[in-house]
Image: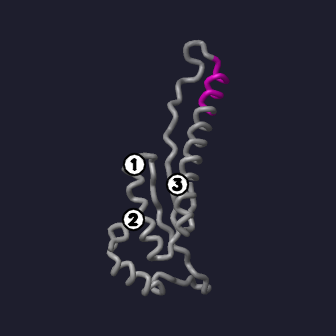
Amino acid sequence: MRVGKITAREYEEALNTRGRYERLTERGHAVRHYILVPLDGSTLSEAILPEAVALAHATESALILLQVLEPVYEPIFGALGVPETTQEEQLARMRDAQLTSIHNYLTNIAKQLQAEGLEIHAK
């Protein structure tokens, strides 16, 4: 049986050696491990999720889902007689729409993964 690309044996070995993943700081606090999962909304980027889930379970790590905001084209303000405020407002609306889209996408993925008992952070 395979869990992602990790064999069942490898998975069991990882479960049995969890202690080696736990490190303490100088003050004796446990260090939390995170796995960064970059996503761009494509099926190809989401193909890594089963692997990340298997690794997170095996190492008791949390997942950080990340999608980078693409830059919005910024035209020269005041060009062609268009007032600067109109373009600035339009640019702000475009950025807000992008942020909302990214937030909704990552929240949806996070909910699916939290159902598998993982700690998920979406950025």
Q: Amino acid at mark 1?
A: Thr
Q: Amino acid at mark 3?
A: Ile
Q: Residue at x 55, y 45 (%)?
A: 102
In the rendered image, the quadrant that contains the C terminus is bottom right
Q: Which residues are magenta?
A: 83-92
Contact (Cβ within 8 Å) of mark 3 with mark 2? no
Q: Amino acid at mark 2?
A: Glu
Which disc, if any, is residue 109? 3
Q: Residue at x 62, y 85 (%)?
A: 27
Which disc, if any, is residue 122? none
Indicate whether residue 45 is drawn in magenta: no
Rendered location of residue 17, percent (x, y): 43, 86
Residue wearing tag 2: 51
Is residue 88 rendered to the left or right of residue 20?
A: right
Q: Residue at x 52, y 67 (%)?
A: 116
Rendered location of residue 3, percent (x, y): 37, 70
Gap in angstroms between the C-alphas marked 1 and 3: 12 Å
* Label 3 residue SS: helix
Q: Residue at x 61, y 83 (%)?
A: 29
For marks 1 and 2, the one nearer the N-term is 1
Gap in angstroms between the C-alphas marked 3 and 2: 15 Å
**Which residue is nearer to you in this view: 113 or 82?**
113
Identify the coloring: one colour
Residue wearing tag 1: 43
Is residue 68 rendered to the left or right of residue 86?
A: left
Gap in angstroms between the C-alphas marked 1 and 2: 14 Å
